[in-house]
Amino acid sequence: MISCRARLVTMDETWLYYYDPETKQQSMEWRHSGLPHPQKIRVQKSAGKFSPIFLGDQDDILLIDYLPKGQTINAEYFSSLLVQLKDILKEKRCGKVTKGVLFLHDNALAPRALATQKELAYLDFQ
């Protein structure tokens, strides 16, 4: 019998910010060799951000997708990730556990949408 842990697939998303690095000239300072480095109090403004979405199981990250700029996670986008996930599970698990996958997601609107729930049932994810 296959354990629940082997059937579990989870998903999470986050915002990652990136910054323009200072040039070597901008970060140079004159100080006495015995003095400590001054603390930088000013927070550097982000040059941008992006949202990676991670889907994984107990062994590996199965899928990393990057949300296109200006797009939000909606039921249609979420359902397309589920279809990609099903294909990846078939490939990586060699048919062992592709049915009855226990899909763990957060309580956001897209995973709870009726269209997403229908896609989960169609793909045989619980």
Image (tube, helix red, strand yellow):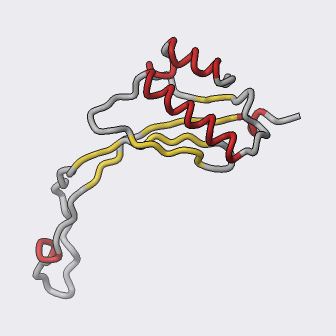
In the picture shown, does residue 46 fall above or below 78? below
Q: Where is residue 74 in the image (x, y as percent from the top left)?
A: 40, 23
In the displayed structure, does residue 118 sit left or right of residue 70? right
* Count of picture labels: 0
Q: Which residue is drawn at 40% across and 43% down?
A: 66
Q: What is the residue that sits farthest to the bottom in this orientation?
A: 33
> What residue sits 26% from the left and 33% below the top?
70
9, 81: nearer the viewer: 81
Q: Which residue is drawn at 19% across and 81% down?
A: 35
Q: Quadrant of the N terminus?
A: top right
Q: Residue 41 location in percent, x, y?
A: 18, 58
Asked which quadrant contains residue 55, the reply is: top right
Q: Quadrant of residue 4?
A: top right
The single residue placed furthest to the right in the displayed view is: 1
The C terminus: image quadrant: top right
Position of residue 21 measured from the top left corner of the image (x, y, whole percent): 22, 64
